[in-house]
Amino acid sequence: KSTYSSNKNKDGWDKSIFSGNRSYSKNTTNTVKDNLTGLIWQKTPNYKKYNWEKAKNYCRSLSLDGYNNWRLPNFNELFYLADRTKYNPAIDTNYFNVKTDNWYWTSTSYKNSSSRAWVVGFSLGNNRIKSDDRYDRYVRCVR
């Protein structure tokens, strides 16, 4: 469950956590807790690629270390997880495993097309829009 402060935007995201501060701790064998947001992340993503719909279904059906309420992260959550002060991979490898050479789905659709969704890359920590039905991408679930 998220513990964002009262500085939330209309989407429920607290922009103040983009300050670059990060704090993680081991939650269970296969999960990591983000101490600033309260989110629990899958430590090691599923290294199988999925299209967007299958990625959302994978997270909804995931059972990991006693948790069953997983979901595909929204754009803000996954983009924040990428640490752009690091390169290849752009993530804290003390806590997370990552495939750096590819993109990870978010649950956030592109505002001008509900059939396209945002993805985040963990080589540089960048983002782009990808079509849900033409591309398969990696998945890291959150709760």
Image (tube, helix red, strand yellow):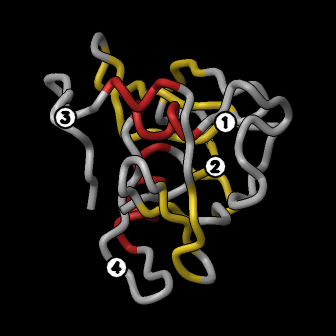
Residue depicted at x 57% and y 57%: 24
Q: Nearer the viewer, residue 23 or 79?
A: 23
Does the residue at mark 2 contact the one at mark 4 (Cβ under 8 Å)?
no
Quadrant of the rendered structure where residue 143 is?
bottom left
Q: Earlier in the sequence, mark 2 or mark 4?
A: 4
The residue singled out by tag 4 in the image is 68
The residue singled out by tag 2 in the image is 138
> Alpha carbon of mark 1 to alpha carbon of mark 4: how far?
24 Å
Q: Secondary structure at mark 4?
A: loop
- Amino acid on which the number 4 mark rests in the picture: Asn
Camera-side mark, 4 or 3: 3
Disc number at residue 12? Answer: 3
Camera-side mark, 3 or 2: 3
Q: Nearer the viewer, residue 63 or 135?
A: 63
Residue 7, placed above or below residue 23: above
- Residue 28 is left or right of residue 89, and the answer is left
Quadrant of the rendered structure where residue 68 is?
bottom left
- Amino acid on which the number 1 mark rests in the picture: Trp
Q: Earlier in the sequence, mark 4 or mark 3?
A: 3
Q: Earlier in the sequence, mark 1 or mark 4?
A: 4
Mark 3 Cα shell of 10 Å, populated few (<14), some (14-19), many (≥20): few
Q: Secondary structure at mark 1?
A: strand
